[in-house]
Amino acid sequence: MKYLKTAFLNHWNLLALFAGTAFALLSVPDVILPLVLAGEIGYVTLLGSHPKFQKYVDAQEAKTVREESSGAKQQTLDHIMKSLPQEPLRRFQTLRNQCMELRQIAMEIKRPGIGAIDAPLDDFQLTGLDRLLWIHLRLLYTQYALSQFLKKTSADQIKQGIAKLEQQITQLSPDKDDSAKQRFRGALEDNLQTSRSRLANLDKANENYQLIDVEIDRLENKIRSLSEMAVNRQEPEFISGEVDHVASSMIDTEKTMNELQFATGLNSVDNEPPELLRAKTPLAGQKG
């Protein structure tokens, strides 16, 4: 049905159908109109069932999905670059610039006098480094968002609230026949459970903050190592394998970032990154 619908809605087909219908209505409708409709059904059925047309429709759908995905990632990139404060943004830009400088050196060694002209053999290396830089940037944003969340939530206040609720529950008389007191106890116990859950979430957020801090340092070191390796070893397949290995080691960290959407507000992002190294202009939101 998808292919038949696309064939029918083709603007040339609709134009021919409207023209044929108009001609039939102005001449001999009882004779020409059934012929027009029969021809339309035959044309749509023939075109919609043709393998080449079906491949064309599938390709257009895939293109639309890629464009939508690319647009969503670009919006996420713009949002992160505009939201990050100076220090983490400078940290990312420093790492990105170092990768670009090392790539320039590698290309000068490989092609003296030509410079960093994009070469087919470098494309997948750049895509791999883009992916790692994309993880790095999202880690920085997640750390920043968590820091804002932790600043707004006081563990001491939650603990004081828990102690107060526990005291209130202890002081209540265990009179099971008093329905009003039982409802009051139930409300206190529910509030106590909520407060304990908040404290557990806060403790987990602190643990995640420390984990992300360590992961940022580890990933920065890995990216620098890979960039330096690209200068010393002109082996694209080896470099690509090392990039994939590092990216695979970050899978659990990416899962953690997705679980922290309550703090970051970011949707889950797939592994295909926006262009970070080959961007011809400064990244959106870049601060001086």
Image (tube, helix red, strand yellow):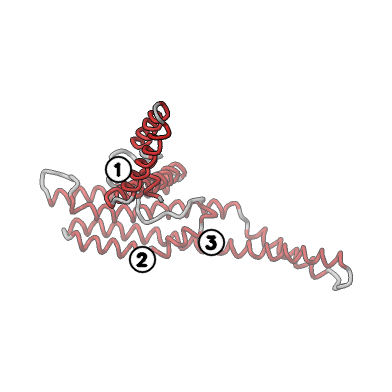
**Disc 2 marks which amino acid?**
Ser
Q: Which of marks 2 and 3 is nearer the N terminus?
A: 3
Dot label at residue 206: 3
Number of the front mark, 3 or 1: 1
On the image, numbered disc 2 is attached to which residue? 249
| Furthest-right residue in this view | 177
Residue shown at the point (37%, 32%) measured from the top left: 20
Q: Where is residue 26 in the image (x, y as percent from the top left)?
A: 41, 26
Secondary structure under tag 3 reads helix
**Disc 1 marks which amino acid?**
Ala
Residue 177: quadrant of the picture: bottom right
Q: Nearer the viewer, residue 110 or 40?
A: 40
Q: Where is residue 142 in the image (x, y as percent from the top left)?
A: 47, 54
On the image, numbered disc 1 is attached to which residue? 279
Q: Which of 89 and 32 is in front in this view?
A: 32
Q: Position of residue 241 (x, y in %)?
A: 25, 64
Where is 43 relative to 209, above or below? above
Residue shown at the point (36%, 62%) measured from the top left: 218
Q: How far apart are marks 3 and 1 (CA)?
A: 35 Å
**Disc 3 marks which amino acid?**
Asn
**Can residue 282 be seen in this snapshot?**
yes
Secondary structure under tag 1 reads loop
Q: Earlier in the sequence, mark 3 or mark 1?
A: 3
